[in-house]
Amino acid sequence: MKKLQAWGTVFALLLMTGCSGSPGSLFGGDSDTLTLEGEIENTIITATSTVSGQIIEMKKGLGETVVKGDVIAVIEHESQQHSVEQLQALVNLKQAVLEELKAGARPQEIDQAEAQVNAARAKLEELQVGSRPEELEQAEAKVRAAKAQYDLVAAGNRTEQIAQARNNISVASEAVDTQQMLYDQSKKDYGITLTLHNQGVVSRSELDVAKNKLDMAEHQFATSKLQLDNAKQQLAQLEKGARAQEVSIAAANYEAAKASLAFLKKGPTKQAVQAAQAAVDQAKAQLALLKNGATEQAIREAVSDLDQAKAQLRQAESKLNSYFIRALDTGIIVSKNYELGDVVNVASQIADIAANDLQVVVYLPVEHLDKVIYNQTLSVSSAAGKLEGRVSYIALEDEYLPEDKQSGSTEPTAVEMKVSVKEESGVLKSGMPAEVTVPLTAKEADE
C-alpha cells in the first residue's frame, strides 16, 4: 500500500490536469485511446547461498554485468566433490554388474565350469573304483624320492642343492612383491568402501566382503614373507651344511611318503567318497547357474541398485552445484555483501542484481479493466522513444482511491498495472517517467 500512497499525489494531479469529459480522456488521449503516465522500475534479484563455507573465488564484481547462470562466487566444496566422484565410481560399478547379468555367462566361463564338473566326477570315480596301478606306482616313486632325499641330506649337501635354494629365494621374493601389490590394492578398496558405508551408500554386507578380502590379502602377504624367510634360512643352512634337524625332517618326509603309499593300498574311506560326491554336486549346480543365466529377479534387483546409485549421484551433484552461487537473471550487480575469504552461512545474501526486465508501473481506471489482459501488447513512450510492452501484472486486490475522492464515494477508481519492456541500449533507468497507451474500443469511446 505504500507504493499506492506514493502514487496518490500523481493520480490527483492527473485528475486536475486531465480533460473533463468521457472516461477515455481522464488520463489523457483521444476518444480511441487511454494514456497512462507511470514510472520505470526494475526487479532486484538476490543471489543467496543455500550452503555454508568459505568463499574461495569471486567471479564477478560490483557494477559488472551478468548473464543468467553466470557464477558470481564459489564456496569451498572439496569434500562434496570427492563424494560425487565416489558415487560416480559406484554407478559405473553397478552399471557393469547389470550389463554382465543381462549378457549372461561367457562361453569361456561355461567351458571352465564343465571342466570342473568333469574333474570332480573323475575324482569321485577314482575313489569309488579304488587306487589304480599308476597311482600306486606314483606313491612308490614318491617313497623312493623321499628315501633318496633322506640319504642325500644325511650324506651332506651338493652344489646343485645350493643353486636350487637360491632359485627358491628368487621365486619367493617375486611372490612377496606380488602379494604386496594385492594387499595395497585391497587396503585401498576397503578404505573407499568404508567411506561409502559411513555415508550410507553401500550395505554392511558389502563392507564385510571388502574387509574379508583385505584380511585374506594381508594373510597371504604375511605368508609370502614367511616363505621368503624360510627360503633364505634354507640357503643359509645349506651353505653351512646339513644339520641333525634337517636329517630329521628328511626322515619324517620319508615316513610320510610310506604312510601315503600304505593308505592307497588300503583304499579310500567312506568320508572321502562322500566329500567327492558333494564336490560333483556343487560343480553341477554352478554349471547350471551359468547356462540358465541370471534370473529376472536378479536383474530387477540390479536395476534397482543402479537406479538408487544414480539418484544418490544426482542428489550429490545437485548439492555440489549449490556451492557455485549463480545469477538468477541477466542484469547488473548493484551490491555485494561478501568478499573473497569470507565465511557464509545458509541463506546468506551474496549479491543483489538489478535485472534487465524493466517495467512501467501505471494505474488503470477500474472502468477500463475489460480493455486489458495479461500478455497484451501496449505502446510505451519514454526517453528511449516508442517501445513495445506487454502487460505482466494487473492488481486484483491492491486498488487505489485518489485523495480527492476518498471523502466522498468509497468505491475504488484505479488498479495497479505493470507493463514489461525490453530496452537494450541502457537509456532507461529505474525512476524515469514513461507513458502507456491503452487502446479503447469504438463502443467504449462513444460512452
Image (cartoon, rainbow, N blue to C red):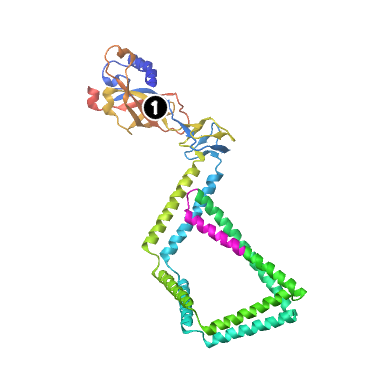
Q: Please state the horizontal and vertical placement of residue 406, each as a whole percent of the image.
A: 31, 14
Q: Please state the horizontal and vertical placement of residue 195, each as a whole percent of the image.
A: 53, 50
Judge from the rendering whether residue 371 lies leftward or rightward of residue 346; answer left or right. left
* Residue sitting at x 65%, y 83%: 145
Q: For numbered disc 1, what is the local secondary structure?
A: strand
Q: Is residue 211 magenta?
A: yes
* Residue sitting at x 56%, y 83%: 262
Q: Please state the horizontal and vertical placement of residue 368, each as a whole percent of the image.
A: 27, 25
Q: Is residue 156 visible?
A: yes
Q: Please state the horizontal and vertical placement of residue 62, each as a whole percent of the image.
A: 55, 31
* Residue sitting at x 66%, y 69%: 172
Q: Quick check: 19 above or below 44?
A: above
* Residue, far bottom: 133
User: In the depicted view, which residue is nearer to us: 393 or 102?
Assistant: 102
Report the residue marked by disc 1: 360
Q: Quadrant of residue 237?
A: bottom right
* Residue, far right: 240
| Mark 1 nearby-residue class (10 Å; few <14, some 14–19, many ≥20) | many
Q: Most prominent secondary structure in the magenta stretch?
A: helix
Q: Quadrant of residue 79?
A: top right
User: In the depicted view, which residue is nearer to us: 425 or 148?
Assistant: 148
Q: Quadrant of residue 147?
A: bottom right
Instruction: Identify the image quadrant of the N terminus.
Output: top left
Q: Is residue 395 magenta?
A: no
Q: Magenta part of the protein: which range?
A: 199-221
